[in-house]
Amino acid sequence: MKIQKRLINLAGAISLMAALVLQLIPPATAVAATQITARSLTLVAGTTDGGSKPGGTVDHKFQFTLSDTVDSLGSLMFQYCTTAAPVVSGIGCVAPVGISTQTATLGAETGATGFTTITASSLDDASDGAYNVTTIGRSAASTIGASPVVVTIQINGIINPTTAQTFFVRISSHTSLNGSGVALEAGTVAAATSTQIQLSGTMPESLVFCAGATVGVNAGSVPDCSTVTTGVVNFDRLFSPTDTAIATSQMAASTNAGSGYAITVNGPTLTSGTNTIAPMSNGTGGPTAGIHGVSQFGLNLVANTVATSTPAVGIDITPASGAGSYKGEPVPHYATVDSFKYADGDTVADSTNVGTDAQIYTTSYIVNVPGSQPAGTYSTTLTYICTPTF
């Protein structure tokens, strides 16, 4: 009886020791997947929506480095979650509200390529049917090669979460062709949707026009009417039957009028008391050349050359017409080199029925007089009027 009791006590002690030993041995744990490195997610604008627009249909560009050169890669899984939890078969992932991979398509791929299929599924814990997982698979699994590789995968047509928030995408690589099984490598990236800034402004009907002795340009080489100088212009020499007196003025114009603008010159010819200098015309309304010893007052808007009675006066319009959005130009009667005209109310320039950026016109004036021209101070006031048609 004593022996049996001792045996029972000994068995109890052995059982207690075994229980203590078992408590000291840790339970078996799953081997964690290798970490994917250099991970990023860029939200790329879709066909109509900006990349970070809440609820927008956009493209998601993933870039990361895979390092497993031993196991064959058959698929990549991208799981959208509200938290950055480890990738463990979808456990612990709640889908961001509004996210949808259901209509996603596979876009550009580099590094690891050959993915031909894409599937969407709803594997979130809430089982609410939200499509927050997309998997891309290859036709056959293969290794990435002998060294780590930078992978770029763009998945197009993903619908962003519908509120402005940070969300996470858990990326995992698998040997299987459909994202099933234990992950080979895993990592998480973060992105955020944000409220879009909507800016608006109104461009009203516009006309900028000025005239003076000279018009300068601003730091961007754009004609600047704030730099225009006085409109008082003197001829370069005394009037003489053996010489041609010249002068110049400038004007600048721009408009967004759909039918462009027209510039007219208005005012009398040069006058001193009752004496005048004849406005130039060829008799049929066109321009004519300057001739010494003949009563002539005329103008044009081009660069002239050195001729017997025509000094090299003037500058062609700058910037030149037809260069990009510069459409202004002198009209034909005032655009003939070494020929001049003047008629009160004539159109001297226009922008050929279209809006134009600012250009500078240089108006060249010439005076010739006969030997009998009465002495005196000859002057006129010319008014240039720019009329846009909207």
Image (cartoon, grey):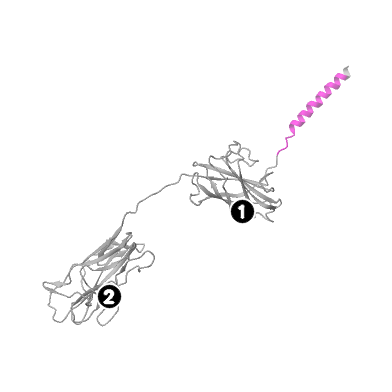
163 to the left or right of 217:
right
Q: Which residue has dot 2 on it?
A: 313
Instruction: State which quadrant residue 341 falls in.
Output: bottom left
Q: In the drawing, what numbered circle is on residue 114?
A: none
Q: Residues within 10 Å of mark 1 (few under 14, many from 20)?
A: some
**Disc 2 from disc 1: Cα separation:** 66 Å
Look at the picture and state if 316 lies above or below 35.
Answer: below
Q: Residue furthest front?
A: 284
330 to the left or right of 102:
left
Look at the picture and state if 129 lies above or below 52.
Answer: above
Q: Secondary structure at mark 2?
A: loop
The stretch in magenta equals: 4-29
306 to the left or right of 139:
left
Name which residue lies at 11% across and 73% down.
Answer: 274
The three-letter code of the residue at mark 1 reads: Val
> Nearer the N terminus, badge 2 or badge 1?
1
Q: Residue 13 location in percent, x, y?
A: 81, 24
Q: Which residue has dot 1 on it?
A: 151
